[in-house]
Amino acid sequence: MILALESSCDETAAAVLSPPAKLLSNIVSSQAKEHQPYGGVVPELASRNHLTLLKPTVENALHSAGVSFNDIEAFAATAGPGLSSSLLIGNTAAKSFALTNQKPFIAVNHMEGHLCSPFLEAQIQPHISMIVSGGHTLLIKVQKFNDYQIIGSSVDDAAGEAFDKVGKMLGLPYPGGPEVEQLALNGDSERFHFPRS
């Protein structure tokens, strides 16, 4: 079994996986309320909150999976991309767990996690995938695991970042993305006509 930690931005997450692809637990501790007064993620605050949230998040993940720390055979953590101070917390914890328990450590690329997680069980290859997240918008051709080609990407803001910025400009609460999405669902799709090619 693998204990995997995620701390690339403002959410602390821990998951227990039974290889090759069975997810036993996935616990996410959000920091949205802590960052709301600032209208966005404050990196130093995010990393300090990871320190506080990591232990209970890991304990909840182990409990939810019905396993003990001694059952873990490897430790994984997001190695990047992300906020460096936040990544440091999850990486240091997972590496420390691995070192003290003499178990393997697995560094996980954040974007590769987004790319591969929907296909863990299906193994659909080759295919074209689109990653649309808070910090990245990428169109990727996947030949097989670990064989990818970026076909295109946003040249300025990622789609998720644009949603949050629009939300902030409109005076909506943070995170703005879900608020903008809700307004769009209640909007009039025929009000403006955009050119299409």
Image: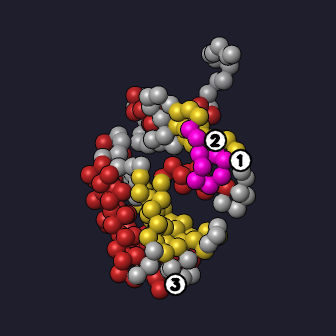
26 relative to 143 in the view: left or right: left
Q: CA distance from mark 1 to mark 2?
A: 8 Å
Instruction: Look at the numbered discs 1 and 2 and tell me whether their residues touch, using CB distance below 8 Å.
Output: yes
Residue 140 image label: none
Q: Nearest the camera: 186 or 16?
A: 16
Looking at the rendered image, the quarter that the N terminus falls into is bottom right
Report the number of discs.
3
Q: Which residue is mark 3?
A: 71
Verify whether residue 144 appears in magenta.
Answer: yes
Coordinates of residue 192 in the picture (x, y in percent): 62, 16
Classify mark 2: helix, strand or loop: strand
Magenta part of the protein: which range?
Answer: 141-150
Coloured how?
A: secondary structure
63 relative to 169 in the view: left or right: right
Residue 141 image label: 2
Looking at the rendered image, the quarter that the C terminus falls into is top right
Q: CA distance from mark 2 to mark 3?
A: 36 Å
Residue drawn where x is 64% and y is 70% of the image: 20
Classify mark 3: helix, strand or loop: helix
Q: Earlier in the sequence, mark 1 or mark 2?
A: 1
Q: Earlier in the sequence, mark 2 or mark 3?
A: 3
The amino acid on which the numbered mark 2 sits, given as a three-letter code, is Lys
Q: Give the class, few, some or many, for how many residues have Cα within 10 Å of label 1's Cα (few <14, many ≥20).
A: few
> Can residue 75 be seen from the camera position used here?
yes
94 vs 197: above or below:
below
Residue drawn where x is 41% and y is 57% of the image: 79
Residue 126 image label: 1
Q: Nearer the viewer, mark 3 or mark 1?
A: 1
Residue drawn where x is 44% and y is 59% of the image: 78
The amino acid on which the numbered mark 1 sits, given as a three-letter code, is Pro
Verify whether residue 10 appears in magenta.
Answer: no
